[in-house]
Image: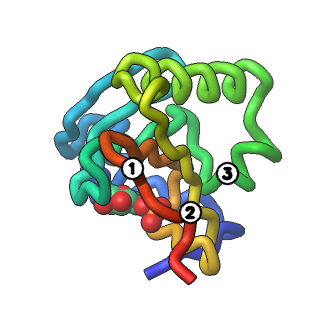
C-alpha cells in the first residue's frame, strides 16, 4: 500500500532494517552517503535501488532537509552505480516514487535504476 510521504520517519521500515544489517540485501555499492542493492522483485533485467544512509522518508523529505553533503553524495552515488553497472551507453531510467499518487510503498527514500533492455513508454496510459 502506498505511504503518506509527509509521515514522520519510521525507524522500523524495511530499508532502515537493511541499513542496520538486520535483514540481508544484495549490495552492489556502498559509501558514506548511500547504499545500492538489487530490488527483491525486479521489474527490468537490471533493477537496483539506491538509498541514502540518512533517515529520509521520501525525495520530498530529502530535498527539504538533507545537508548539501548528503545531497551531493547521494546524487553522485546514483550516477556512479549507473555507470558501474554499464547502464549509461544503452540507457536507463531513474525513478523516485513519492507518496500516494506516486505509489511509494517503502517510507525511506529510494531511487530505482532500471535498465538492461528497452524500457518502453514512461507510463502506461
Ligand atoms: P516503491 O513502490 O517505490 O516504494 O518501491 C519499493 C521497492 O522496494 C519495490 O520495487 C520492492 O520490490 C522493493 N523491496 C521491498 N522489500 C525489499 C527488500 N527487502 N530488498 C530489496 N528490495 C525490496
Residue 83 in view = yes
Q: Is residue 56 above or below residue 41?
A: above
- The location of residue 102, given as percent across then percent down, is 60, 71
Q: Is residue 27 above or below residue 107?
A: above
The label on residue 59 is 3
Residue beneath the point at 54% across and 45% down: 94
Dot 1, crowdedness within 10 Å: few (<14), some or many (≥20)? few
- The location of residue 81, given as percent across then percent down, is 43, 24
- The location of residue 62, given as percent across then percent down, is 70, 44
Which callout, 2 or 3, points to the residue nearer the camera?
2
Q: How many marks?
A: 3
The label on residue 118 is 1
Residue beneath the point at 26% across and 55% down: 42
Q: Is residue 63 above or below residue 33?
A: below
Per the image, the residue denoted by label 2 is 122
Left or right of 23? Residue 83 is right
Between the C-alphas of marks 2 and 1, the distance is 11 Å
Which callout, 3 or 1, points to the residue nearer the camera?
1
Ligand 1 lies in which image quarter? bottom left
User: What is the basis of the colouring in this image?
Assistant: rainbow
Q: Is residue 86 above or below residue 106?
A: above
Q: Nearer the viewer, residue 45 or 113?
A: 45
Q: Nearer the viewer, residue 44 or 70?
A: 44
Left or right of 55? Residue 28 is left
Kindly state the secondary structure of the residue where label 2 is placed.
Answer: loop
Amino acid at each position: 500500500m502506498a505511504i503518506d510521504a509527509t509521515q514522520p520517519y519510521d525507524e522500523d521500515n524495511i530499508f532502515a532494517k537493511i541499513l542496520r544489517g538486520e535483514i540481508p540485501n544484495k549490495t552492489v555499492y556502498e559509501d558514506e552517503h548511500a547504499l545500492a542493492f538489487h530490488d527483491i522483485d525486479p521489474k527490468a533485467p537490471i533493477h537496483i535501488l539506491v538509498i541514502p544512509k540518512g533517515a529520509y522518508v521520501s525525495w520530498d523529505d530529502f530535498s527539504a532537509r538533507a545537508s548539501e553533503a548528503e545531497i551531493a553524495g547521494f546524487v553522485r552515488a546514483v550516477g556512479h552505480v549507473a555507470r558501474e553497472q554499464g547502464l549509461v551507453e544503452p540507457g536507463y531510467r531513474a525513478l523516485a516514487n513519492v507518496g500516494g499518487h506516486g505509489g511509494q510503498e517503502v517510507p525511506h527514500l529510494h531511487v530505482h535504476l532500471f535498465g538492461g533492455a528497452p524500457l518502453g513508454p514512461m507510463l502506461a496510459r
